[in-house]
Image (tube, coloured by chain):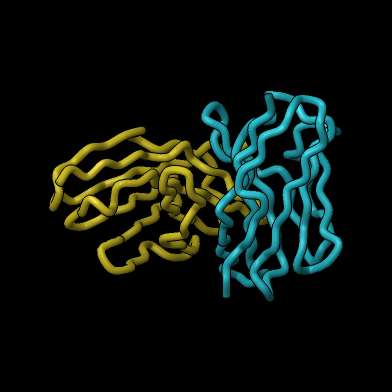
Chain colours: A yellow, B cyan
Amino acid sequence: KQEVTQIPAALSVPEGENLVLNCSFTDSAIYNLQWFRQDPGKGLTSLLLIQSSQREQTSGRLNASLDKSSGRSTLYIAASQPGDSATYLCAVRPNDYKLSFGAGTTVTVRA
Amino acid sequence: DAGVIQSPRHEVTEMGQEVTLRCKPISGHDYLFWYRQTMMRGLELLIYFNNNVPIDDSGMPEDRFSAKMPNASFSTLKIQPSEPRDSAVYFCASSTGTVIGEQYFGPGTRLTVT
């Protein structure tokens, strides 16, 4: 069974600092990996999706890398802002459509 | 597009009552997913459909839970009878069947069973 782990569980940084969020998974036979953002009491917003054949994806201040062989992905958020405060979840997808989620990293960016 | 629509947004019910949660996927998406999120277990996939047909319901916790998709634009998740341990946020998501298959989530229904 696929296990997805996100470390750290919580992170607090001053505004302007770069954020590094980690995700690891036990089974490297994945189809893709998706990073989501969840605000309190809200649904999930897709941030980036990396196909298994890709090494990284970028969108604005966000960059996600994928090392499938070692079972790791990292989400970088450059020049953090208070509006980046949220919980970030990673999810891996095997060859079917069943996403396995990590528990998330809760980020607080202090103004 | 309005995105994935779920109703109600909040539901409070008494133990033993029937609860029905509703979802309208994004138009053109042929995959629909029901998830449950709790503090203890995080996000869990309950069931998913392809072209209105249930493909995998192995995540449905017990027979009290049932899901239907009578057409491409509507799905329901029913709990009968409800129990306090069913209290959670239930999300619906949809995606296309393309290679990418990015999933788009609805805002969720917060269910409280007293």
Q: Total label count?
A: 0
A81 to the left or right of B43: left
Q: Nearer the viewer, residue A94 or A10?
A: A10
Residue at point 46%, 62% (across, down): A49
* Quarter the C terminus of chain B occupies: top right
Q: Position of residue B68 (x, y in %)?
A: 83, 53
Q: Is residue A7 left or right of residue B17?
A: left
Residue at x-position 20% and y-position 53%: A80
Residue at position x 33%, y 68% in the image: A59
Which of the pair B69/A93 is nearer the observer? B69
Task: Provide residue A81's location: percent of width, then percent of height.
Answer: 21, 54
The quadrant holding residue A13 is top left
Q: Nearer the viewer, residue B96 or A54?
A: B96
Residue B44 appears in the picture as rendered = no
Determine which quarter of the picture holds residue B60.
top right
Q: Is residue B97 above or below residue A98?
A: below
Residue A14 coordinates in the image, percent (x, y): 14, 43
Judge from the rendering whether residue A18 lies leftward or rightward of residue B101; answer left or right. left
* Residue B107 in view here: yes
Residue at 72% from the left image edge and 32% from the top image edge: B13
Looking at the image, residue A50 sits to the left or right of residue A97; the answer is: left
Location of residue B69 (image quadrant): bottom right
In the displayed structure, B74 sits above or below A40; it is below
Give whichever of A78, B87 is nearer the camera.
B87
Q: Up-down: is B9 above or below A48?
A: above
Task: Name the image quarter holding the N terminus of chain B.
Answer: bottom right
